Image: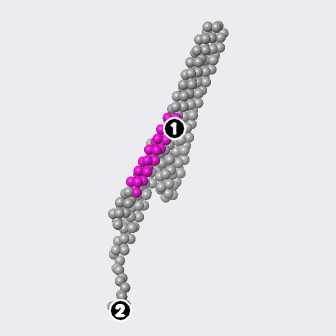
Amino acid sequence: MNKRAVILLIFLLVLIGIIIIGKQREQAIQLEQVETQAANELRRVAAEAQKARETALIETRRIEAEAERAKQEAIEKARIAEEEAQRAREMAVDAVKQKADEIQAKINELAAQSTALLDGGEYQKAIDMAQQILTLDPNSPEGQSIIERATAKLKEIAAQQIGTLTEGVQGTLEAPVDVPAIPGQ
């Protein structure tokens, strides 16, 4: 009976580990998708800036043939396009920084909540919330630490429960058995 409980506990721990690894992998894939989307958006903005630059240069060449005044107008358009491209790049960089700040704020919030759950003895909920941290940042030391601490507590509780069950079984086996007398014998 004791070996079965230990095997069951090991099986549960392995199953929890597999689930955690699966969630971490899924979270890493989601983070990679977000990064890919951000990179694609950056490339799109750069392509638009390049297209605007090329359009301005073509316009400048056409206007140079007409007159000096037309040339000055085209140069002004090119300058405006460059400023817009610069603003677009700055906006893209700001958007990426803002997203990173939002992610870090969310990580901080989740870390505080999962630490509170851990302190409150809600270890599985703390692990689940720490998994959300790892979805946002697979290398988060906070998320990994919370999972490690909660897993250790769950193992400790499981060991205590096994000990209690073992003592209960041993106590039952050591207790004398009263066999009632059969009337008439």
Residue drawn at x 36%, y 87% is 181
Prevailing SS of the magenta stretch: helix
Q: Quadrant of residue 68?
A: top right
Residue drawn at x 54%, y 31% is 41
Q: Which type of secondary structure does the marked residue at label 1 adopt?
A: helix
The foreground one among 131 and 101 is 131
Look at the image and tell me in which quarter the C terminus lies. Answer: bottom left
**Vertical position of residue 51 compared to residue 67: above or below:** below
Furthest-bottom residue in view? 184
Q: Which mark is residue 34?
A: 1
Q: Which segment is the magenta one?
A: 12-37
Amino acid on which disc 2 is placed: Gly
Do residues under tags 2 and 1 come within 8 Å of each other at their CB atoms? no
Residue drawn at x 50%, y 47% is 132
Amino acid on which disc 1 is placed: Val
In magenta stretch: residue 24: yes
Q: How many angstroms separate mark 2 from mark 1 (CA)?
A: 84 Å
Q: Can residue 144 be spotted in the picture?
A: no
| Residue 111 place in picture, x, y as percent | 51, 48
The foreground one among 138 and 45 is 45
Q: Earlier in the sequence, mark 2 or mark 1?
A: 1
Q: Quadrant of residue 141?
A: top left
Colouring mode (rainbow / by chain / secondary structure / one colour): one colour
